[in-house]
Amino acid sequence: MKTGLKRVKLHVKKNDMVVVLSGNDRGKSGKVLRVYPVKNRVIIEGVNIRKRHMRPTQSNPQGSIIEREFPIHASNVKKS
């Protein structure tokens, strides 16, 4: 663990249903897919979708652009 970062007990857990309180996705709801207690962030299904450019590999020689959920701060969500 890095110096200065503490594991914080969050008010949400995996599989909780939450509503986003602020940001571009305000008002959206979804299920918590993953929790990062050290960074105080959560990943919510269908919220904060970003495009990720994947480099070409042997299994995927073309490369691709995929859309996936990225973490948001836990203070921006509440249980519903």
Image (cartoon, grey):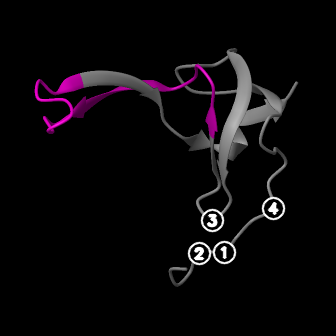
* Distance between the alpha carbons at the discs numbered 3 and 1: 6 Å
At label 2, counting other C-alpha atoms closer than 10 Å, the crowd grade (few under 14, some 14-19, many 20 or more) is few
Quarter occupied by the C terminus = top right
In the rendered image, the quadrant that contains the N terminus is bottom right
- To which residue does mark 1 refer? 6
In the depicted view, which residue is nearer to us: 18 or 75? 18
Measure the C-alpha gap from mark 4 to mark 3: 9 Å
Real-space Cα separation, disc 1 to disc 4, in angstroms: 10 Å
Q: Residue furthest right?
A: 80
Q: CA distance from mark 2 to mark 3?
A: 6 Å
Q: For mark 2, what is the residue? A: 5
**First along the sequence among labels 2 and 3:** 2
Residue at 69%, 45% (x, y): give it. Answer: 74
What kind of residue is marked 1?
Answer: Lys
Q: Label 4, secondary structure: give it.
A: loop
Q: How many badges with numbers are in the image? A: 4
Which tag, 4 or 3, sits closer to the chain's start? 4
Q: Are marks 2 and 3 in contact (CB under 8 Å)?
A: yes
The amino acid type, in three-letter code, at marker 3 is Val
Q: Quadrant of residue 58?
A: top left
Going from the N terminus, do you reach mark 3 or mark 1 first? 1
> Does 35 sit above or below residue 23?
below
**Secondary element at image label 2:** loop
Quarter of the rendering containing residue 19: top right
